Amino acid sequence: MRTPEKIAEECELIALDDRLGAVTRWREETGGHAAGHLPVYTPREVIDAAGMLPVGIVGSGEMEIIRGDAYFQSYICHLPRSVVEMGLTGRLDGLDAMVFPATCDVIRNLSGMWKLLFPEKLVHYLDVPHNHDPEVGGKFYAGELRRLAHDLSKISGVEVTDDRLHAAIERRNESRRLMRKLFDLRSDSPEKVPTAELYVLMRAGFQMAQTAHDALVREYYEAALASSRPEFDNARVIVTGSFCEQPPIGLIRTLEKAGCYIVDDDLLLGAHFILDDLPLDGDPFQTLAESWFYHSRSTPSRFVPDEVKGEYLVQLTRKRNAEGVIFAAPSFCDPALLEQPMLQAALDRAGIDHTAFKYAENNGQFHPILEQAGTFTDSIKLWSEAS
Amino acid sequence: MTDKKDTKEIPKEPSMVRQKELISGYFDQLATAHEDGKKVVYTFVPGNLAELLAAFDVIPVLPEINALQSGMRKLSRDYIATAEKSGHSEDVCTYVKCDLGMMEQGIGPTGKPIPEPDMLLLSYTGCFTFMKWFELLKERFPKAEVAMLHVPYQGDGVITKEMRDYTVKQLETEVVPKLEKITGKKLDRDRLKELLQRSAQAEEDLVWTWEAAKHRPSPIDGYFGGVFYIGPIFTAFRGTQEGVDYYRLLRQEVQARIDAHQGPITPHGQLNDQRFRIVVEGPPNWTSFRDFWSMFADEGAVCVASTYTRVGGLYDQGFRHDPDHAMETMADYCLGCYTNLSLPQRTKLIAKYCEEYEADGFIAHSVKSCNSFSAGQLLMLREVEKLTGVPGGFIESDLVDPRYFSAANIKNRLESYFQMLAQRKGSGSTQAVGAML
């Protein structure tokens, strides 16, 4: 059996490869088509059912930005710069389509930029429903997903039938079960599942065929469970705000080095946005549509009419027995940063400690964050004991 | 160039005076709305349902208008500081922070109170930040009725039947019932029809006004002056007789300037000698509005068309409210607002403006607060140049945060840009000149 560290090493090579080597290999082996999708959430089942490889595109903090900067003004998050850089340097040539889900104005406009920059590619803007009546918003979103399926089918030549989509949902249910199990193990024994490892494992899945990735997750789970890593007197924290542009892996390691056990997070949220198994009967498009209403995590880009802001985070903190929350949002991320004061107010009402900082995906200096997170964990450990 | 009259007070156009009266009267009405038994609905400008609200006799509060009014009155700096002190990030939209800070201080931009909302109506059109703003308002006013009208984005550059049906369904099942609930009365569809009819009348005159900029000299400034012209139709006066009368007055005034071969009145006087005809993309800066305008006027630059003045409706592209199909026309209005267009659509529209208005230049004003406008503008600039040969310029500042308006930098950039335009015009040798003249 490989150690969790070894598996994580393999995953990191895949996950942080901004040339999408794993996708290229998959295409060479299968001769199949691939479709990229931007954060936050795209139902990968639809891409899968169209016989294509869903590829999560979350930018790249590792890459030097040479051309991407020339396309954006000063005051904007970093993600679109690196995504454009990836596109202009041929790193995304292996993708036959790009799906831009309704997340924020930047990703929305990026869809139009893609149309102008890469007119030969399929560019699909996927609207999501802010009306939560299944007969109104649900039907609209189901129609959007049908339109996506139709567009993708034109590329792959594979029609998305109800049977194919049900099968894809069933496969995705299995992946989600595995991921939930791993999240639970991390929460129960955070020393066995460092978030830096879980993160690269999840992110590798954005470039891999699902069955191959599931096998890797199972292997990692068994290896982590069997591992005997020392347990430290760390503070159990939840990291939130990182659902779209991703922090550099060094930042996650810095938080762990600073004495944090990250017991839940919204990193790569698209990979764990749906919380439950989805039903396998009825109209599968409607099922996926209604999963947005009934089976999804709270996140700033999802409007919920009767939501009490922050309630989800408070409940999650309690469920994970966390001692504090770290708000880690990308600079200039309107969804995360506009939501933050509402979440902080909810945490204050619930008496939950929190701290906040911003990052960009290409940050290279982590010392201030080490100091800040260290102070936060110290305050949790020392002051909570004192009180 | 302008006839500079720095020492004298510059006469205002009659329409500007009337516009000021209308807006001032609106704020007065707002201040006593609840005492007068009126219901108040907070909503946003793009895709606002002015006629529907008027049909229920409710008064709209438009938070962006409050923010820009605060900006023009030099109040926004303090409001933004107040919001930042209470935990709002320096990175986010300053309209939002200005509005929240204003509420903290409990007074509206004109010094009169803004009543609390009976309903929050989010017509989610073309701006994601509206949704978060709306959620923040929801936290602040938990007793208010809440209605979300989700307007799908024109990602593929078209309004499909599904998009229209979805929007209409929401109007019928979400928005109208909630307005009926807060007002205690049924929607009077005949009245709505009359209001929509009046909107269409006003829209005709507004379009005539925009198109007057095709004359030389242009009798209007379609950006700086244009923001005055859109005031009534973007806010509470669409569908009203006052709105119709205002646009008729405006039309007469502009016709008189065409007849007299006169340009618009700018901060430095009448701009008759127009060296450059410019198309502008993006909202203006409000905190230094007059200085900003002067940077153009001083160079003899008149803005012949702008995209900001189309955020409340693309009437010049043929849209008119259709009184015979009330719900459908309101849906189309929301779906068709400028910021709900895809980037390729926006690019084509700007290129069309450059050609139809015979522009010498195209300037994108990127504002920190508005990714809906700004993300992608640099690519649009290149594309417009490619399509038309009209040279583009790019400047950055903000809507209402004075910290981001660097007057010296912007002036320097604009001067350099206009010098470049002058050289091109003078040499007559570049590809751009063909498109300019």
Image: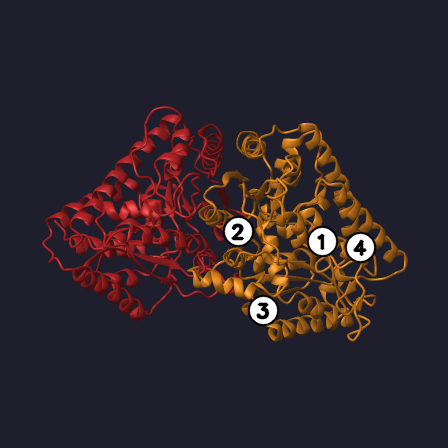
Chain colours: A red, B orange
- Mark 2 and mark 4, same subunit? no
Q: CA distance from mark 2 to mark 1?
A: 21 Å
- As helix, strand or loop, the secondary structure at mark 2 comes to helix
Q: Residue type at mark 4: give it.
A: Lys
Q: Is residue A258 visible?
A: no
Question: Going by the image, does A306 lie left or right of B33?
Answer: left
For label 3, the crowd category at 10 Å Cα-Cα, with few meaning under 14, some 14 to 19 and many 20 or more, is many
Query: Disc 1, disc 3: CB below 8 Å?
Result: no
Residue tagged 2 = A109
Of the image marks 1 and 3, the number of the one nearer the N terminus: 1
Residue tagged 4 = B214
Residue tagged 3 = B405
Name the residue nearer the viewer: B420 or B16: B16
Q: Residue type at mark 3: give it.
A: Phe
- As helix, strand or loop, the secondary structure at mark 3 comes to loop
Q: Residue type at mark 2: give it.
A: Asn
Residue extending furthest toward the right: B259
What's the residue at 61%, 28% (across, down)? Answer: B186
Q: CA distance from mark 4 to mark 3?
A: 31 Å
For label 2, the crowd category at 10 Å Cα-Cα, with few meaning under 14, some 14 to 19 and many 20 or more, is many
Q: Badge 4 sits on which subunit?
A: B
What's the residue at 11%, 56% (across, down)? Answer: A229
Q: Which mark is residue B353?
A: 1
Q: Residue type at mark 1: give it.
A: Tyr
Q: Badge 3 sits on which subunit?
A: B
Image coordinates of residue A91 in percent, x first then y, are 41, 55
Q: CA distance from mark 2 to mark 4?
A: 30 Å
- As helix, strand or loop, the secondary structure at mark 1 comes to helix
Question: Going by the image, does A23 lie left or right of B77?
Answer: left
Query: Disc 2, disc 1: CB below 8 Å?
Result: no
